[in-house]
Image: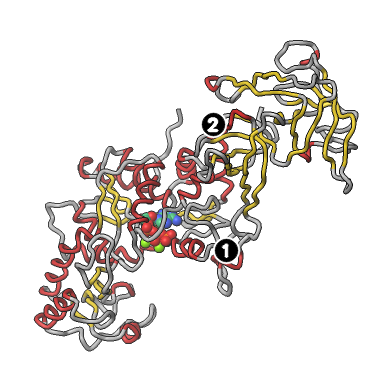
Amino acid sequence: SEEKSLHFIEQIIEDSLTNGFPQDRLRFRFPPEPNGYLHIGHAKSICLNFGLGLKYNAPVNLRFDDTNPAKEEQEYVDAIKEDLKWLGFNWSEELYSSDYFQQLYEWAVAMIKNGKAYVDSQSSEDMAIQKGTPTQPGVDGPYRNRSIEENLTLFEGMKKGDFPEGSHVLRAKIDMASTNMLMRDPLMYRILHRHHHRTGNDWNIYPMYDFAHGESDYIEQISHSICTLEFVMHRELYDWFLDQIYDENRVRPHQYEFARLNLNYTVMSKRKLLQLVQENVVNGWDDPRMPTISGLRRRGYTAAAIRKFCDVIGVAKRENIIDVSLLDFCLREDLNKTAPRVMAVLDPVKVVITNYPVGAEEWLEAENNQEDESAGFRKVPFSRELYIERDDFLEIAPAKFFRLSIGNEVRLKNGYIIKGESVTKDSKGVITEIQVTYDEDSRSGSGSEASQRKVAGTLHWVAVKTAVEAEVRLYDRLFIDEAPDSHKEKSFLEFMNKSSLQIVKGFVEPSLSDAEIGNHFQFQRLGYFVVDKDTTDSKLVFNKTVGLKDAWEE
Ligand code: ATP
Ligand code: MG
Ligand code: MG
């Protein structure tokens, strides 16, 4: 087998091991904020962090970065855990930044005592003006040199809830003239009188991401804290906050950045996905058109395909946009190996075999998956009246029409060769029935000479009498624009594809009547489909996952 070359983060880890870093101190984390469902971009980060855990036999924590009670909910915590498990990863510990609120507070108090933090009581507008610009240094504000005692008293008052939101903040005292804007006395705490999904009303102040994240990594003794490129400039601050608390006998975390996954024809920010949900543009976070893990799962994407996709795109240092067709390629590769083949007709027209005995029925042998011998065979009922796809018939065939027409023969998959004879139409000229004759010696697999006969094409079909009705949901991409959120003047909502969902009534072979929610199938010649969660005992619902590359994958 082929040896895969190391990606740059593996290379960094190999180098630190070579330089004496003990392997048993390697530790990683995946740190979602529970303010939305996970999306395919998160899968990239998940596969990276948990992949490193597996490769180096190191723990990977699931840390909920729950420092902003305004946007976080238990529903999201539960969904994130479900999605992670479904993707096939096991975390070592389930942890919450909110569990560290007391420790973080104590460190903040210590920083005040060391002259490294102060309470600022200005408006956010005034603070923004003093901050300067990338080309112009900031200036010190009037509260920068408050006494330690005053700072301690005010900070305690903030904690107790003595002050309204927006009246004070705690800032790190670093350098208002730093070339890195993020180092110009960044906020550490703000006042929020909010209910937190885990700490309730215990806190009236909440730490900012930059302060909480690195210190949480330190508490958990994360060796490699991996995030996306937009945090490159934050690294200096990450290191500065660690300098305030670091004990050299413990592991010092380091931040490393990789390129986030961008996919075309979709949006991936949780804020925008939430907007789609709240404005009912889609039917919830797990709508099969959503790029969320739960949406992809419901659409019929497999965990194996998503993992494979993340593997194929690799871990890059520079931003790029991945074509969504690569994900579909990985998906087809997986489903081709695993999905049983069945027959379904989604736009039915009736066919009557005039020389087939009335009332007769036979059970034909059908292979479940030619890619997987162990999948075996099943029986499919055949009788005088069948459904085929409306567009598999034309009265007069143009050149290269390899389907059914008057006077021409085709094979019915797993069955007989039939020949078009005549049609019946309604008053508007729409075909309501096609009459055909069959060659009774031509049954597939019978070994007869007629069964070997080559005909123009092979059609899928379902016998009318035993057909099971099903609702089938067909999807198109959600956006008509390759980069819907890249337009300065227009909202991404202006690029919605108005026909991204089409619902049809079709017929499936009776073996599908006991299919279960989440089961995958290849509807032969049509694509891959999955049983939707809206399925009940009396109603089968399928989602089209993805089409086939070729008409027949034989
Ligand atoms: P979004 O910006 O989509 O709302 P986020 O980055 O705010 O997502 P978090 O919950 O903070 O979401 O992310 C958890 C982890 O997943 C972080 O380490 C983050 O860097 C990573 N991540 C988020 N989006 C992507 C992406 N598109 N590609 C790779 N990693 C991502
Ligand atoms: Mg975030
Ligand atoms: Mg974000």
Residue at figure coordinates x 24%, y 78% from the top left: 169
The answer to whether 116 is drawn above or below residue 348 in the figure is below
Measured from the top left, where is residue 80 in percent x and y? 37, 51
Mark number for residue 547?
none
Question: Mark 2 sits on what residue?
Answer: 514
Measured from the top left, where is residue 414 in percent x and y? 70, 22
Q: Earlier in the sequence, mark 1 or mark 2?
A: 1
Tell me: 73 left or right of 504. Answer: left
Measured from the top left, where is residue 354 in percent x and y? 85, 24
**Furthest-top residue in view?**
448
Quadrant for ligand 3 reads bottom left
Tell me: 321 left or right of 253. Answer: right
- Between residue 84 and residue 514, name the one nearer to us: 514
Task: Examine the image and state in which quarter residue 149 appears.
Answer: bottom left
Q: CA distance from mark 1 to mark 2?
A: 40 Å
Measured from the top left, where is residue 334 in percent x and y? 53, 35
**Furthest-bottom residue in view?**
142
Residue at figure coordinates x 48%, y 45% from the top left: 297
